Image (cartoon, rainbow, N blue to C red):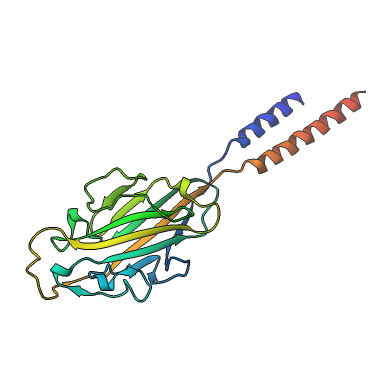
């Protein structure tokens, strides 16, 4: 009987060790900044255009901004696009959390297309009182600038991945996990300044935002089961001694 109790205690101690939990993956959706979904999303991919002119710039999906192409001559090039992305339905509290952004046709300087035309992006996260920048302005896929939050850039113009491996400390205790992506378009090399008629037209781009979280392991259930088995063994041991008497 003592051997049985010892084995049960070992079992409980083993089961009390946190066991690996399955990760939860959710996709972000674009909003107007106040929680209302906007824009065009197909198969978890956001379809958008980065404006080329200041008069077509603004917040994605609000007033049609970023939903259609525009044209501009090079001397007037310089549009911006603010895109709010929100995640819901993730694990909290989370043991780990990472966020990956996939881009189709994000023209960073290192491999931009067309030549001399470039786009940039900066990432910010809502901290309860405002959006806090967590990266510098990302201009070049081949240059890693020390950011506020560690990230990596992989892939190429057709399949660009910007990954934040650890955003656990930024997850809110309730509500949505909110990001702000700020895009710009510009040209940085000579050769386009002689283009006085509208000669640049933006094309459609795509992105998807994925949040992966793993829940904090909860061994309490197995502890309860193990405690019940020990209690059962204790009862059996008491009956055994009562019979001997």
Instruction: Please name the residue shown 87% across and 25% down the image.
Output: 241
Instruction: Residue at 11%, 58% (x, y): give it.
Output: 189
Quarter location, residue 4: top right
Q: Is residue 65 above or below residue 100?
A: below
Q: Residue at x 28, y 73 (%)?
A: 56
> Where in the figure is residue 215, as x and y percent of width and height?
54, 47
| Residue shown at the point (93%, 23%) measured from the top left | 245
**Res. 105 in view:** no
Question: Which image quadrant is residue 202 in?
Answer: bottom left
Quadrant location, the N terminus: top right
Left or right: where does residue 156 sit relative to residue 172? left
Asked if residue 226 shows in the view, the reply is yes
Residue 171 x/y as whole percent: 49, 51
Front residue of this view, candidates 196 and 61: 196
Spot occupied by residue 106 in the image (x, y as percentages of width and height): 25, 60
Location of residue 185 (image quadrant): bottom left
């Amino acid at each position: 009987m003592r051997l049985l109790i010892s084995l049960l205690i070992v079992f409980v101690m083993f089961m009390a060790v946190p066991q690996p939990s399955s990760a939860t993956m959710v996709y972000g959706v674009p909003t107007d900044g106040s929680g209302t979904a906007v824009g065009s999303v197909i198969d978890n991919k956001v379809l958008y255009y980065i404006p080329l002119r200041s008069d077509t710039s603004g917040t994605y999906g609000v007033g049609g901004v970023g939903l259609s192409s525009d044209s501009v001559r090079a001397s007037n090039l310089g549009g911006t696009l603010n895109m709010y992305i929100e995640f819901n339905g993730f694990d909290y509290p989370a043991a780990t959390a990472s966020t990956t952004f996939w881009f189709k046709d994000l023209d960073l300087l290192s491999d931009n297309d067309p030549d001399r035309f470039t786009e940039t992006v900066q990432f910010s996260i809502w901290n309860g009182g405002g959006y806090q920048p967590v990266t510098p302005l990302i201009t070049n896929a081949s240059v890693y600038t020390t950011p506020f939050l560690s990230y990596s850039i992989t892939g190429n113009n057709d399949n660009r991945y910007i990954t934040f491996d650890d955003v656990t400390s930024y997850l809110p205790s309730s509500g949505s996990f909110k990001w702000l992506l700020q895009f710009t378009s510009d040209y940085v090399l000579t050769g386009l300044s002689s283009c006085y008629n509208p000669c640049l037209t933006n094309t459609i781009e795509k992105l998807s935002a994925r949040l992966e979280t793993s829940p904090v392991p909860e061994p309490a259930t197995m502890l309860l089961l193990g405690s019940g088995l020990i209690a059962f063994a204790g009862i059996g041991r008491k009956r055994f001694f009562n019979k001997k008497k």
